[in-house]
């Protein structure tokens, strides 16, 4: 039986995983907390610089190991299929580990863990369909083609809100392409990724292909980003940290993929189906406790239906069931960190002082012990220049703004430093398509929200980062193109003249 269960880890030190072996870290350890109770439940290692070196060395050795380097594309796919089956067989355990770490409701964690299995199968099927191209150059007796190769060692720095799902956006395409990984989970949510490492071994991946070094971003994360043996960085997290990573990676001339913050506009037009739209707005901000980069935290409503939508949002918010995250009827669990509770409460007080009208929530629910809970909160009469509308909150707080016409709606929606996601509810396809063209966001949802797919590229514009996860675009991100030119004319060329196309 696996050692990585909630019961098996309570009060224990979490190990690290290097070159196919679990072991205790030589670094210091710090408490991991259960957000539902506010109590310590395990100890997390702050891995040492030497352990990061070992993990990178193991990954680089794996890239030269014939068992991985020379494995056929089809056989890489078979390994991913095996891992997908193992994840599917362990959904309940993996989901409970994530819930214990980050407080998100168990029902959602089950769904997201099942999505990990789906993602692994998608990229497993793609592994032997990664092709180069033949280029018809204007040179006789010359064959020009390209091949795609792995980038090398990928440093994956994973956030705490959906660790397995967000890791898999990097892991699945990176492994399908033949790369090796050094993973740093969030110091607040490491257990499920270590459990995944056990499944990676069971699936048959060679030692060193997948490594996990836990710890804080300022120590372990920084060491991975700056390590000369790491070829590319994949980071999901806050924009301020993303800036530091981009700077360090750029200084080392290594590429980085960054999915950062968001302040996504969620728009309700006067011709929308209001039952569907209001439910979509509620889901877009309160699902996952608002702790998602694509949270629709700015809700723009046409002035002609503004009061009705506010009334509907207030009524629907009152119905949200707050409770223990492992209870099957809970819709909103605790926030993942006590610091998030304090941050969210600061936003709520700030919105009040700036003149926004609190119409729902705004406090902390009673009867839930010392858990890190915040009520689902709605503010009306928000202006786009308020802090509530400018900064990412990462909590269950919705600001509702009014617009008069489509031009004003687009102007307000784009008046943000971010550009990750967006949504619009309308029965006018012409309006929807105009919005799609004019909105500055990497993802546009029409008459739906928070509806990602492993088959569909995702990623942001502006300060929401760059690079694409999911779909074939992800394989491109974790590969590099090599151009090959073959002269089969058998003739000598002028040694002092470049042979250019005519």
Image (cartoon, rainbow, N blue to C red):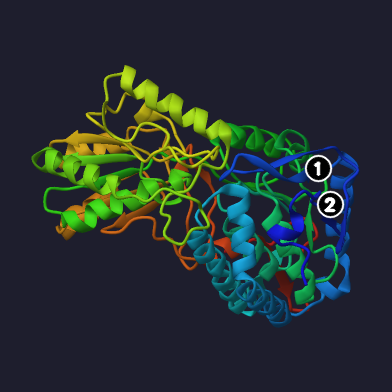
User: Residue 483 vs residue 433: left or right?
Assistant: right
- 22 with respect to 140 (left or right): right
Evaluate if marks 1 and 2 touch, with contact meaning CB atoms under 8 Å apart. Answer: yes
Mark 1 highlights which residue? 227
Q: How many marks?
A: 2
Q: Residue furthest left?
A: 304
Q: Position of residue 11 (x, y in %)?
A: 77, 48
- Examine the rendered structure and indicate whether residue 101 appears above or below residue 200: above
Q: How packed is label 2: few (under 14 Cα within 10 Å), some, or many (20 or more)?
A: many
Whether residue 167 is visible, yes or no, is: no
Marking on residue 79 = none
Residue at point 50%, 29% (across, down): 343
Asked if 307 appears above or below 342 in the picture, the reply is: below
Q: Nearer the viewer, residue 143 or 461?
A: 461
Q: Where is residue 367 drawn, in percent x and y?
A: 45, 41
Q: Secondary structure at mark 2?
A: helix
**Which residue is label 2 attached to?**
56
Quadrant of res 357: top left
- Position of 66 with respect to 32 (left or right) is right
- At x 13% / y 36%, what residue is drawn? 404
Tell me the quarter of the picture where residue 114 sits: bottom right
Q: Position of residue 209 (x, y in %)?
A: 80, 64
């Amino acid at each position: 039986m696996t050692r990585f269960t909630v019961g098996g880890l309570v009060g224990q030190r979490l190990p690290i995983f290097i070159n196919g072996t679990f072991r205790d870290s030589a670094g210091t350890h710090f408490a991991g907390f259960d957000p539902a109770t506010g109590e310590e439940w395990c100890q997390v290692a702050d891995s040492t610089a030497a352990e990061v070196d070992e993990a990178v060395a193991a990954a680089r050795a794996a890239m030269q190991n014939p068992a991985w380097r020379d494995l056929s594309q089809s056989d890489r796919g078979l390994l991913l299929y095996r891992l997908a089956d193992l994840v599917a067989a362990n959904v309940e355990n993996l989901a409970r580990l994530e819930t214990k770490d980050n407080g998100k409701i168990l029902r959602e964690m089950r769904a997201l863990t099942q999505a990990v299995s789906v993602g692994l199968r998608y990229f497993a099927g793609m592994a032997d369909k990664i092709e180069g191209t033949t280029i018809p150059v204007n040179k006789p007796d010359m064959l020009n083609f390209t091949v795609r190769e792995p980038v090398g060692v990928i440093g994956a720095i994973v956030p705490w809100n959906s660790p397995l799902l967000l890791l898999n956006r990097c892991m699945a395409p990176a492994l399908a392409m033949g790369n090796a990984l050094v993973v740093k989970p969030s110091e607040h949510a490491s257990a499920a990724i270590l459990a995944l490492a056990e499944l990676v071994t069971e699936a048959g991946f060679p030692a060193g292909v997948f490594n996990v070094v836990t710890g804080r971003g300022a120590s372990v994360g920084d060491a991975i980003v700056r390590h000369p043996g790491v070829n590319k960085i994949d980071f999901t997290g806050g924009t301020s940290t993303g800036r530091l990573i981009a700077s360090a990676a750029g200084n080392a001339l290594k590429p980085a993929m960054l999915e950062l913050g968001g302040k996504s506009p969620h728009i309700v037009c006067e011709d929308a189906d209001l039952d569907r739209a209001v439910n979509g707005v509620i889901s877009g901000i309160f699902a996952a406790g608002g702790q998602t980069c694509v949270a629709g935290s700015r809700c723009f409503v046409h002035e002609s239906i503004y009061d009705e939508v506010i009334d509907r949002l207030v009524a629907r918010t009152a119905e949200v069931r707050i409770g223990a995250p492992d209870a099957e009827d809970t819709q909103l669990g605790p926030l993942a960190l006590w610091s998030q509770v304090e941050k969210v409460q600061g936003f709520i007080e700030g919105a009040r002082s700036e003149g926004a009208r609190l119409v729902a929530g705004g406090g902390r629910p009673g009867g839930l012990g010392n858990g890190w809970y915040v009520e689902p909160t709605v503010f009306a009469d928000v202006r786009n220049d308020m802090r509530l509308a400018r900064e990412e909150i990462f909590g269950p707080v919705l600001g509702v703004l009014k617009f008069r016409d489509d031009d004003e709606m687009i102007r307000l929606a784009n008046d943000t430093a971010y550009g990750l996601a967006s949504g619009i509810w309308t029965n006018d396809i012409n309006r929807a398509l105009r919005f799609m063209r004019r909105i500055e966001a990497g993802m546009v949802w029409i008459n739906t929200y928070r509806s990602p797919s492993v088959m569909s590229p995702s990623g942001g514009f502006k300060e929401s980062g760059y690079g694409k996860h999911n779909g074939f675009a992800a394989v491109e991100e974790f590969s590099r193109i090599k151009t090959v030119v073959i002269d089969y004319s058998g003739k000598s060329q002028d040694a002092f003249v470049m042979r250019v196309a005519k």
